[in-house]
Image (cartoon, rainbow, N blue to C red):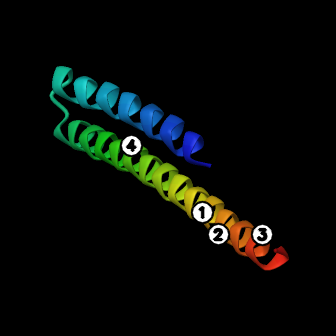
Amino acid sequence: MAVEDDVKGKVDEVSGKAKEVAGVVSDDEKLEAEGKAQGLAGKARGLFGDAKDKVEDSAENLKDKAEDAVDELKSKFKK
């Protein structure tokens, strides 16, 4: 589910930012880098969720168009 990807992505972004700030404040370069990486991974996950939404919407749209085309053909043959 794309919403799940969006939520988990935001959680990772926020957690990553917190780690990054903690790393800066404590002068811990490793923690800062981990935070940046986690934040970027969260952003990527959110973008993946957006892409999944768009694909699902497109697939649903194509399905609806195909059903409409089949219904139109059926109505033509009934005449």
Any mark on residue 75, and which?
A: 3
Relative image position of residue 55 (x, y in whole percent): 49, 59
In the picture, measured across the screen, residue 32 lies left or right of residue 1, that is left
Cα distance in 3D space between marks 3 and 4: 50 Å
Q: Which mark is residue 69?
A: 2
Judging by the rendered image, the residue that carries numbered circle 4 is: 42
Residue 13, quarter of the rendered image:
top left
Q: What is the distance, in whole Å, between disc 2 and disc 4 at their CAs?
A: 41 Å
Q: Position of residue 77 (x, y in %)?
A: 79, 79
Secondary structure beneath label 3: helix
Task: Indicate the amino acid at tag 3.
Answer: Ser
- Crowd band around label 2 with a 10 angstrom C-alpha radius: few (<14), some (14–19), many (20+): few
Q: Nearer the viewer, mark 3 or mark 2?
A: 3
Numbered circle sitting on residue 65: 1
Instruction: Say whether disc 2 or disc 4 marks the residue closer to the N-terminus.
Output: 4
- Badge 1, how many Cα within 10 Å: few under 14, some, many 20+? few
In what element is the residue under mark 2? helix
Q: Which amino acid, by three-letter code, is at mark 4? A: Gly
Badge 1 amino acid = Lys
Is 64 left, or right, of 41 in this rendering? right
Q: Which mark is residue 19?
A: none
Q: Nearer the viewer, mark 2 or mark 4?
A: 2
Instruction: Say what secondary structure mark 4 lies in.
Output: helix
Residue appearing at x 19%, y 20% in the figure = 25
Which is in the foreground here, disc 1 or disc 4? 1
Quarter of the image that includes the C terminus? bottom right
Is mark 3 in CB contact (under 8 Å) with mark 2?
no
